[in-house]
Image (cartoon, grey):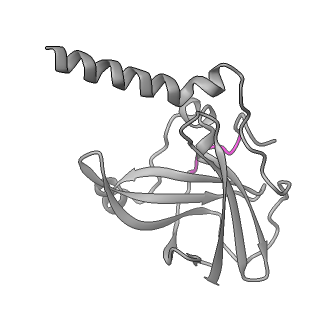
Amino acid sequence: MKKKLIIFILCLFFTAANYSCRLLGLCEPEKLSFARINFLGTQLKTQGYYYGDSIFSEGEYSVKVVLLYKNGIFLNNYPIKLSKFFFEPQLPIVSSEVLNNRQYHWGIFKIDNQKLTLEYWNPSFDGCPKVVKEEADILNDTTFVIKGKNKIYRFRASLVKPDSTNNFIK
């Protein structure tokens, strides 16, 4: 019983420490390094989503998905269960309320020739999201590869996508 209490107290302490800086107003999320600009090019398609390799998380396989929008915003780490990915042609929609209030789902992108630059927020231990910058080579209008990680993303058309309106990028 004593051991369980100590474990519970430690878990509570680490959870509180994880969010305390932001909740107390002691830190601010990092700023993105470039401004959002509308994407007017044809280097990559935007009428659907890009999916990466499958990953095993929380007891099941899922696919990491990236959605690019014409307004220069992108949605990162959009979760799709592998079973849905193979059997449903359209992107399952997650509640806008959930997405709009989680900063680490959102970012901006720009394309220069055949180079894609993605900037987005990642959760951090202190509760203040940190900016991550990734660059990718565009192989064609349906495929890009994240440099350094060799993660390949392929396009899948979808008639529906979540709205890109969020509380973090204007």
Q: Residue furthest left?
A: 1
Q: Is residue 150 left or right of residue 37?
A: left
Residue 115: x percent and y percent?
72, 78
Residue located at (64% from left, 75% from top): 136
Q: Residue furthest bottom?
A: 139
Q: Is residue 89 left or right of residue 28?
A: left
Residue 64: x percent and y percent?
45, 59
Residue 103: x percent and y percent?
63, 39
Q: Is residue 115 left or right of residue 58?
A: right
Residue located at (49% from left, 76% from top): 152
Q: Is residue 167 left or right of residue 33?
A: left
Total numbered circles: 0
Residue 11 counted in the magenta span: no
Residue located at (70% from left, 72% from top): 116
For the C terminus, the image quarter is top right
Residue located at (40% from left, 52% from top): 80
For the N terminus, the image quarter is top left
Can the viewer see residue 22?
Answer: yes
User: Considering depth in this image, is 154 or 17 the residue closer to the camera?
Assistant: 17
User: Considering depth in this image, is 20 or 94 the residue closer to the camera?
Assistant: 20
Residue 46: x percent and y percent?
66, 64
Say which quarter of the image contains residue 23. top right
Q: Is residue 23 above or below residue 67?
A: above
Can the viewer see residue 140?
Answer: no
* Predominant SS of the magenta segment: loop
Q: Is residue 152 above or below residue 134?
A: below
User: Considering depth in this image, is 3 or 113 the residue closer to the camera?
Assistant: 3
Magenta segment range? 161-165
Q: Is residue 97 above or below residue 77?
A: above
